[in-house]
Image: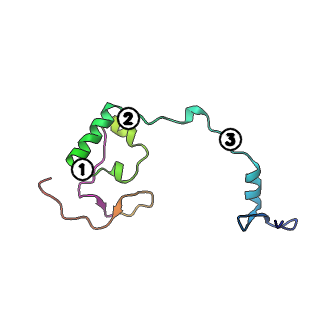
Amino acid sequence: MNVAPPGSDAGSEAGGRKLLRLEVRNSATPIERKPPWIRIRATMGPSFRELKGLVRREGLHTVCEAAGCPNIYECWEDREATFLIGGEQCTRRCDFCQIDTGRPAPLDTGE
């Protein structure tokens, strides 16, 4: 194990690379557990299951599902959903979103 000279910005090696002073200090500090009240259980009640069934049955594409929204259970339990009306692709390219980007197909007037 190589140790950096005193006063340098690096610490001992980990996985073949030198650790920065900040990494060395952080690795010595244990991660504190979050209090139990900070976590909320996802409730999949009857309203959520009913709305999910409707979306599947009708072949609808929701932003909630396509974007991988972590709050989908909360909104769908309140019977709220956001829909992509032009299909399952979006013309925008947001970094945080998991929706496919591209030119949507022509609108289905019978939908």
Closer to the chain start, of discs 2 and 1, is: 2
* Residue at the spot 11% in from the left edge and 54% down from the top edge: 110
x and y, in percent, of residue 100 in the image: 34, 62
Q: Which residues are magenta?
A: 80-91
Q: Is residue 38 above or below residue 1?
A: above
For mark 3, give the secondary structure: loop
What residue sits right under mark 2 in the picture? 44
Q: How far apart, in angstroms, are the residues tagged by discs 2 and 1?
A: 19 Å
Name the residue located 38 percent from the left edge and 35 percent from the top edge.
Answer: 44
Q: Does residue 6 appear to the left or right of 79 in the view shown?
A: right
**Labels 3 and 2: the sequence-earlier one:** 3
Which residue is found at the position 34% from the left and 39% from the top? 76
Horizontal side of 22 relative to 110 (left or right) equals: right
Residue that badge 1 annotates: 60
Amino acid identity at mark 2: Met
Q: CA distance from mark 3 to mark 1?
A: 42 Å
Q: Residues within 10 Å of mark 2 (few under 14, many from 20)?
A: some
Is the C-beta separation of discs 3 and 2 under 8 Å? no
Point out which mark residue 32 bears: 3
Q: Residue furthest right?
A: 6
Q: Specify the amino acid type for callout 1.
A: Leu
Secondary structure of the magenta portion, mostly?
loop
**Residue 85 vertical placement versus 30 (above, below):** below
Q: Quadrant of residue 54?
A: top left
